[in-house]
Image: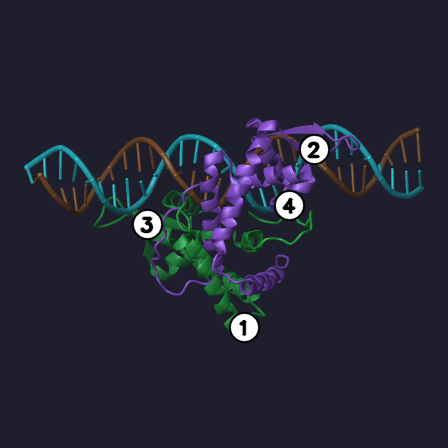
Chain colours: A purple, B green, C cyan, D brown
Amino acid sequence: MRRLAEAPEFGAEEEGLGRLLLRVVREMRTRFDRDLERVGLTAQQAEILFRCSRAGELTPKQLTSLLITDNAGVTRLVDRLERKGLVTRRASANDRRSVTVRLTRSGTALVPRVARLAHAQKRRLFSGLSAAEQEQMRSLLHRILDNVGPAA
Amino acid sequence: MRRLAEAPEFGAEEEGLGRLLLRVVREMRTRFDRDLERVGLTAQQAEILFRCSRAGELTPKQLTSLLITDNAGVTRLVDRLERKGLVTRRASANDRRSVTVRLTRSGTALVPRVARLAHAQKRRLFSGLSAAEQEQMRSLLHRILDNVGPAA
DNA sequence: TCAAAATACTTGTCTTGACAAATATCTTCC
DNA sequence: GGAAGATATTTGTCAAGACAAGTATTTTGA
């Protein structure tokens, strides 16, 4: 995921909230992915780097709960990072079913740049939104999330 | 996309607005995809069906502006619908570079069920949100969207 | 007129997301 | 102790999103 195609409305009636949400998230993501191109990462990969950097090491299971994807997705994200030489997988000491993901030296070296980009993105996106507005947003989103529920 | 994996927070500090947005959109999408399984469609495919049904026929270019994806994505979505026998592609009359996508009889037959599912989804998601709250949400989202801007 | 630029679509490639099924390793509890 | 079930990870498959590059056709403009 990188640059986003232009999407200049066609059947210009009012856009539904659902579609608007979708569009916002997609553009956020694409924009961030594009910014991250300069360090050769994607948003998800950067998240893993960042989390591992803070925690020292994490298992795929732990990463799964942090990344909003499933365990299979994490496996392959880690695969890519491993191929890039940014993380290593080691068997867990106490539970041999498990694995610990840990940054390599060059992975660690990338973290400050990633953090800087992430911080810039966050500042940019929510600039102009007061703390109260952000809180309002958060609350509305949580209510929607509760409404999603299980499939019918 | 179908069922969503459980994601029970791990490093339970406050979740950022960006992540929350991502999570909400993903669960909305996955839930809708799952509901649509019973008619053998995905959310994007359903959108094409629905749009073509209302417009009579649409070109990929028009669909691209409606679907929040790029032209390549539309090509392949239409491919899948064509394989399922739900739409046809015909050369455009006046511009032979172009193509018109039109529902087949069985595509048309599916529309009411899709519309019903879409309507149910919309009602469910935003139930409990007042019109004012939805408007507030919409406004905040537009502001974020404006903040995304072009890549640095 | 007719070559160059623009436009509409398609195809190729990589990354991700979701789910099912397979494998390896614990844990339980008879 | 050892079978049955639970858990952690991986692998396979399909749909999608983004972008680049290719093809066919139309439009521009020298």
Chain identity of mark 4: A
Q: Residue at x 54, y 39 (%)?
A: A114
Name the side, left or right, on which C6 lies relative to B125. Answer: left
Chain identity of mark 2: A
Q: CA distance from mark 2 to mark 4?
A: 15 Å
**Mark closer to the observer (1, 4):** 4
Percent x, y of residue A33? 48, 42
Sequence order check, earlier mark of 2 and 4: 4
Q: CA distance from mark 1 to mark 4?
A: 32 Å
* Residue wearing tag 2: A100
Chain identity of mark 3: B
Chain identity of mark 1: B
**Mark closer to the observer (4, 3):** 4
Q: Amino acid at mark 3?
A: Lys
Instruction: Confirm whether circles 4 and 3 share one chain.
Output: no
Describe the element under mark 2 as helix, strand or loop: strand
Q: CA distance from mark 1 to mark 2?
A: 46 Å
Q: Nearer the viewer, residue B57 or B131?
A: B131
